Image (cartoon, rainbow, N blue to C red):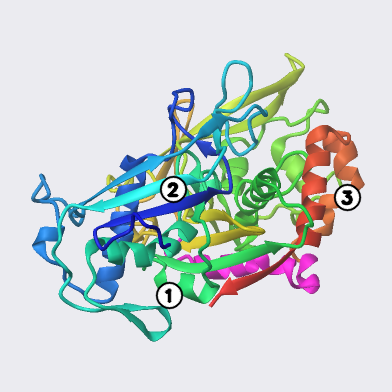
Amino acid sequence: MSDHHNSPYCRLVELRQYTPLLHFQGDTEGACLRASEVKPKLDRFVWDYLNRNQISIPESWQLKNMDEESPYEPALRYKMRFMGNMKKREDKKHLLYFAQNMDGTSIALESLSNTRMTIISLVKDRLGTDCPLYNNKYLENPTICELIDALLPAFFCLHCFGTRNGKGFGSFEIVGSTISDEEIDYYKERDCMKVYRLSSSRNSYSDMNCLDDIYVLSGMMKGGFNRPYYKGDIQKYLWRENIGSEKSFIKQEIFPNETVNNTGESLLDWYNNDLCGGRNHRPQKVYKNNQFLRAMLGLTDHYDYFFYNRNLKKRVVKTIWVKSKNSEITRFANPIRFKPCSGGFRILVYRIPNAMLNKSQASEDNGFEFSFSSKQYTLYTPEFFDLVAFMHYFLSPFHDNKSRKSHNWEALKDKSYQLYYGKNNSQTRFFNDTLDNLRIAYGWEESI
């Protein structure tokens, strides 16, 4: 990262963009990466490194917290600015992002050239101690800019920016830097439990290829798909322990008599009869209990379910609202994050906070309230959930042919699904084409 502008108190780096940046002011001239977003993330990353290595820093490096009771470490005393030449993409919005302009185009930005990032120290004091680096190396008594310079490659390999950054939008990395999976594992934050890397063998790999792959993988992991039908793996994960998900709870307790098609068949009967023969679920049964498993991969405030109204002769939507009884939980982002990189992407697995796990179901302020019409129902999350074990279960079809049967992998290609649900519509074709690419192009490996 050498440059004639670089000094112990100033750093200039160039960033290469991998995926579009969804900017809340995307129509504004000069829109680019925002220091107001990147700097707080980088500060937390630096503090995490310092705390893991039990390194104290001079008070002169820290900006005083205005809120003395704040649980967060102080901001660090350096300035950051970005200069880039970005334009708005003209293609249509991607399935991973739901907002769009009135004309249907996306608000995504892409760089016409590398983005320049400048870091300027506001203090000249040195740290006063050496800093351990990967592979038994040390950084001798650095300035704040020299420390940040050493951590920047790993930082940009582990973070995306802008809207929907957890799904891979806004991915940048430092031009000319090379970093191994082992090095990424060394620098990753304490709350990041595991990093997986999926490398594509495609001859040509665009940012849209990458986002298509992430869309299908994230859907298979959590919510599943209706056309073609695929039940999210999070809902199937605990079948072997005779535990159902919130979906089986909703079908049994809230909507047992709703019809799903023009035959008048009830939702529960439809689920039991397994009309398509190859649908990837086992016949409905009474589980030992049902748990709010989907919450382990992020919370939303509502779920929409579609049913067939025989009087109106069309499908209608019914909404179930979800609210935590625990005042500590106002929102919870998906702990599985995607980070596009050269020739593929990484999957980062973060720790689930204890507040999301229901240690005791006896407490009145525990659990989640499901509301429909004037009725309320309570459902609990698991007392323990091993997210790394779930990811091994989910990713196993990419490297183990024997496990595809248990994942009902081949059922995704079942023609009866297309005939019954999508009649080979564009969404079904997109899903199957992307699935084929995933199976052919990727072999997964974990960062050790």
Q: Determine whether label 1 and label 3 are within 8 Å by CB.
A: no
At 50% from the left edge and 55% from the top edge, which residue is drawn?
173
135 shown above or below 91: below
In the rendering, which numbered label is found on residue 186? 1
In the rendered structure, does residue 310 fall within the stretch colored magenta? no
The amino acid type found where label 2 is placed reads: Ala
Furthest toward the front, the residue is 4
Question: According to the image, label 3 marks what residue?
Answer: 414
69 shown above or below 269: below
The region drawn magenta spans 382-405
Judging depth in this view, the residue of 91 and 113 nearest the camera is: 113
2 or 1: tag closer to the N-terminus: 1
Left or right, 209 with respect to 73, comes to right
Please tell me in which quadrant of the rendered image residue 423 appears.
Answer: top right
The amino acid type found where label 3 is placed reads: Asp
Question: According to the image, label 2 marks what residue?
Answer: 333
Residue 375 image point, x, y percent: 45, 31
Residue 384 image point, x, y percent: 44, 66
For the image shown, how many numbered marks are present on the structure? 3
Q: How far is disc 2 from disc 1 in space, using C-alphas?
A: 24 Å
Judging depth in this view, the residue of 369 and 9 nearest the camera is: 9
At 73% from the left edge and 66% from the top edge, which residue is drawn?
398
Main secondary structure along the magenta-highlighted residues: helix
